[in-house]
Image (spheres, helix red, strand yellow):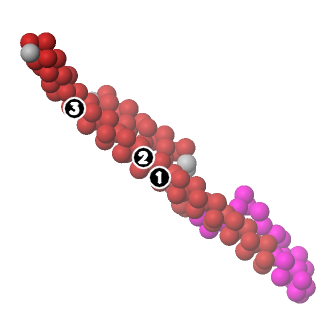
């Protein structure tokens, strides 16, 4: 049962290390809150700069968050897979040891 709690702690760590919930919640937010103020209301140059910089910041934020989310999900799946493999190995180890002991005795006798 302790093995299961260790595995659960590893899953918790990976989820919090990559901040998967926060990244998914702020997926399309500007990167590092980098935004441009509007400036003068009726100046088209300020309006264009405002729109372009904010769109670029959101695109950069989305791309970086997508990469980090992908890496986090891959790490989470790897942790699940490794946990399952360790658990199966843990269950089969006594049978493998008994089989190897029997095989070794058989080689000694033969």
Q: Which mark is residue 82?
A: none
Q: Is residue 57 left or right of residue 71?
A: right
Residue 109 visible in image? yes
Crowd around label 2: few <14 · some 14–19 · many ≥20 (10 Å): few
Q: Residue furthest front?
A: 110
Residue 27 location in percent, x, y? Answer: 59, 64
Crowd around label 3: few <14 · some 14–19 · many ≥20 (10 Å): few
Residue 109 location in percent, x, y? Answer: 8, 12
Q: Which mark is residue 74?
A: 1
Going 37% across and 45% down the picture, which residue do you hit?
A: 80
32, above or below 2, in the image: below
Magenta extent: 27-50
- According to the picture, the residue beneath numbered tag 2 turns out to be 78
57, above or below 46, in the image: above
Going 79% across and 72% down the picture, which residue do you hit?
A: 53
Of the image marks 1 and 3, the number of the one nearer the N terminus? 1
Q: Is residue 23 magenta?
A: no
Is there CB contact under 8 Å for labels 2 and 3?
Answer: no
Is there CB contact under 8 Å for labels 2 and 1?
Answer: yes
Residue 13 location in percent, x, y? Answer: 49, 40
Q: Is residue 109 or residue 100 the one in the foreground? A: 109
Q: Which mark is residue 91?
A: 3
Residue 81 placement: quadrant:
top left
Q: Secondary structure at mark 1?
A: helix
Q: Quadrant of the N terminus?
A: top left
Q: Is residue 55 left or right of residue 20?
A: right
């Amino acid at each position: 049962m302790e093995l299961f709690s260790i595995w659960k702690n590893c899953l918790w760590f990976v989820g919090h290390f990559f901040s998967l919930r926060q990244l998914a919640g702020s997926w399309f937010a500007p990167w590092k809150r980098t935004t441009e103020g509007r400036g003068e209301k009726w100046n088209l140059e300020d309006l264009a700069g405002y729109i372009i910089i904010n769109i670029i910041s959101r695109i950069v934020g989305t791309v970086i968050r997508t990469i980090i989310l992908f890496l986090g999900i891959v790490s989470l799946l790897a942790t699940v897979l490794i946990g399952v493999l360790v658990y199966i190995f843990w269950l089969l180890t006594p049978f493998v040891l008994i089989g190897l002991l029997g095989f070794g005795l058989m080689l000694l006798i033969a």
